[in-house]
Amino acid sequence: MPLGYHIRIRPRTSGTLIKTKEQRRVVARTVLGQGRKHDLLAFGPGKEHLHMHTGPEADPGQLARNVESGLTQSLHLDGGFERAHVEPIVKAGHMYNVFRYDLTQAAHHGLSGDPLFEGTNLPDLLAARLLGCYTANNVRRLLPGISREDLLQYLELETLEPADAPLDWLVAATLAAAGVPDLVGHGAEVSRARRAAIAVASDRLTPERLGQLLNVSKRTIYRLIRQRPNDRLVVAVRLQLGMMGQRAHAVLGSIGPYC
């Protein structure tokens, strides 16, 4: 039985797969949503394709089809996908190499628009996003040689601690931690994200300012303040602020102001 699988999918139409940070979050949501049942360990997009790395319990063909279907709809891709490339992994060393390779796809292809690795599950592995926290359990189980220090090296950080600033990045940090494309509407995930942001910043920003940032009325802010936030999401937002604060030069230098 293979130790895992390396999967590559590519749309038939040429061109950059991910064009905006909102699309990057949509891709991550799609992969993480489908990967839970397939032992997902890591994923990362190149310019025109996407790599996924799984453990042995995956059905790699089914995972590829599910992700392709989701991306076809969410990214409005015409023409479908080429036949997925699936490589069984039979050596332990290869498992570690594939894991590292998939997380660093952007660097392999000279892409610089994702300095915080939102297009991968690195934030989930560091508890800075909740959608794919299950991948951290998979990595601990199947790749025990991967440490938190190893993961931080991809961000060029020695440590990562929760932070409460800079608040100029609050919305960006909230979107990244929740894995939602925007803060539009009143769906459960968006409301949960707003509550987390309020928990981080309500002692320093007025309700009026919070309402402006979070796209709701002052009345809604007062209502959300009375509701208990998801503690893990609050920590994830603060970890995102910690990353942004330390990586500000890279973030601003690569794509301009983040939000």
Image: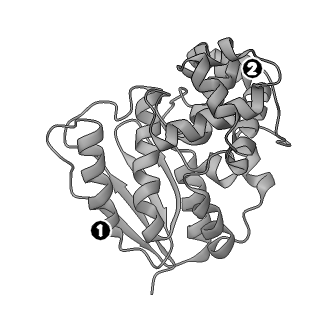
Specify the quadrant of the image occupied by residue 26: top left
Left-right relation of 164 to 187? right
Q: Residue 167 carries which label?
A: 2
* Gap between marks 2 and 1 measured at Cα: 43 Å
Q: What element carries label 2?
A: helix
Mark 2 against mark 1, which lies toward the viewer? 2
Task: List x then y, in percent, for residue 230.
Answer: 67, 48
Task: List x then y, in percent, for residue 93.
Answer: 62, 71
Q: In this view, does 148 lie above or below 3?
A: above
- Looking at this view, is 160 or 223 the one in front? 223
Q: Residue 9 carries which label?
A: none
- Looking at this view, is 248 or 53 the one in front? 248
Specify the quadrant of the image occupied by residue 175: top right
| Callout 2–callout 1 Cβ contact below 8 Å | no
Quarter containing the N terminus: bottom left
Q: Residue 61 carries which label?
A: 1
Q: Residue furthest toward the bottom?
A: 1
Q: Can residue 186 be seen in this view?
A: yes
Kind of residue at badge 1: Gly
The residue at 62%/74% (across/down) is 142
Left-right relation of 21 to 132? left
Q: Which colour scheme is used?
A: one colour
Q: Can residue 127 be seen in this view?
A: no
The residue at 78%/20% (across/down) is 166
Specify the quadrant of the image occupied by residue 71: top left
Kind of residue at badge 2: Leu
The residue at 21%/49% (across/down) is 81
